[in-house]
Image (cartoon, helix red, strand yellow):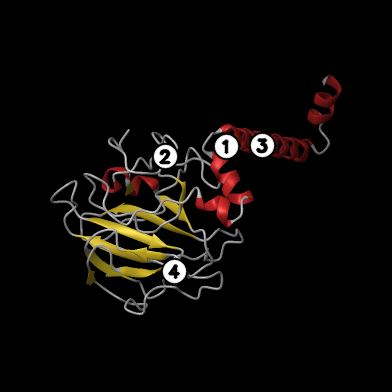
């Protein structure tokens, strides 16, 4: 160790050696943190269902699928798609983290892209921005749980890997403020992931997004701009209080 320190602080190339050593230490720290995150995820009992979903055939996967077309008791939103609710609200498991948790819920489909229907979770006004290939957002003027507030419901991944959408023809790109009733067919689940090199399973990402106070939705990618969908769905889909059951819950909140 002493020999290394003498070499490190020797005048020749001192700055370069210090810089490279600092970079090596930062890389080691980053790898250590990644390993700890992976170990935590593997030890999480809820990750066992992910392993079952990954390794199982469609018959095995069907055991993890939640089918819920009616409202849970006391709920205001219907579950927008049938499937395995694999990533929860506030979920820190990869590809998310403690500092950047999941902003909604991911409902994975036990079928190919373009097969599992996606329905409007509540009455509202649908917008599809002109450049959106796989996404819709729905304005709910009066939040049923916080009357007087406006919220937005975001649905995405409704396209294949190449960006060919599975959204209903009633909502072409550029659609603005088209009213739909709860239960209206919006499209079908897909596996589009934008320009990311990371493949995703066929699923629907659904989130409840806050309003900016001026009639526009906030950035859904920021966790702090979203709300826990659990009390709206009547299901405990918050990572902090989920017990491993994805059915209706008498107390869906933490």
Furthest residue in direction front, as rendered: 59
Q: Name which of mark 4 and mark 3 comes first in the sequence.
A: 3
Local crowd size for mark 4, using a 10 Å CA cut-off: few (<14), some (14–19), many (≥20): many
Q: CA distance from mark 1 to mark 2?
A: 18 Å
According to the picture, the residue beneath numbered tag 4 turns out to be 134
Q: Name which of mark 4 and mark 1 comes first in the sequence.
A: 1
According to the picture, the residue beneath numbered tag 1 turns out to be 41
Image position of 245 with respect to 199: above or below: above
Q: Name which of mark 1 and mark 2 comes first in the sequence.
A: 1
Q: Is residue 203 left or right of residue 144?
A: right
Name the residue located 61 percent from the left edge and 51 percent from the top edge.
56
Local crowd size for mark 2, using a 10 Å CA cut-off: few (<14), some (14–19), many (≥20): few
Viewer-nearest of discs 3 and 1: 1
Viewer-nearest of discs 4 and 2: 2
Q: Name which of mark 4 and mark 2 comes first in the sequence.
A: 4
Residue 45 image offset from top left, x and y in percent: 54, 34
Mark 4 lies on a secondary structure that is loop
According to the picture, the residue beneath numbered tag 2 turns out to be 245
Instruction: Answer with the quarter of the image where residue 158 lies.
Output: bottom left
Instruction: Answer with the quarter of the image where residue 150 lies.
Output: bottom left
Q: Name which of mark 3 and mark 1 comes first in the sequence.
A: 3
Query: Quarter holding the N terminus?
Result: top right
Mark 4 in CB contact with mark 1 (< 8 angstroms): no
Mark 3 lies on a secondary structure that is helix
Viewer-nearest of discs 1 and 2: 2
According to the picture, the residue beneath numbered tag 3 turns out to be 26
Furthest residue in direction top, as rendered: 2
The one nearer the camera, 156 or 187, is: 187
């Amino acid at each position: 160790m002493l020999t290394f320190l003498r070499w490190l602080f020797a005048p020749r190339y001192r700055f370069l050696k210090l810089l490279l050593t600092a970079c090596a230490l930062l890389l080691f720290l980053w790898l250590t943190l990644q390993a700890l995150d992976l170990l935590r995820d593997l030890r999480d009992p809820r990750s066992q269902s992910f392993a079952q979903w990954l390794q199982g055939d469609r018959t095995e996967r069907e055991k993890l699928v939640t089918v819920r077309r009616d409202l849970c008791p006391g709920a205001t939103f219907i579950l927008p798609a049938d499937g395995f609710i694999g990533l929860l609200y506030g979920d820190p498991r990869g590809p998310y983290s403690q500092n950047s948790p999941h902003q909604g819920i991911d409902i994975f489909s036990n079928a190919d892209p373009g097969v599992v229907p996606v329905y409007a979770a509540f009455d509202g006004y649908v917008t599809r921005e002109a450049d959106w290939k796989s996404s819709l957002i729905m304005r709910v003027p009066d939040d049923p749980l916080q009357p007087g507030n406006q919220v937005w419901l975001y649905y995405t991944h409704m396209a294949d890997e190449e960006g060919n959408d599975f959204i209903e023809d009633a909502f072409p790109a550029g659609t603005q403020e088209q009213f739909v009733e709860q239960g209206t067919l919006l499209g079908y689940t897909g596996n589009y992931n934008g320009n990311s090199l990371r493949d995703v399973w066929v699923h629907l990402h659904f989130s409840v997004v806050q309003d900016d106070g001026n009639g526009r939705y906030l950035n859904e990618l920021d966790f702090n701009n979203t709300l826990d969908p659990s009390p709206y769905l009547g299901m405990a889909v918050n990572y902090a209080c989920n017990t491993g059951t994805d059915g209706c819950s008498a107390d869906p909140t933490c």
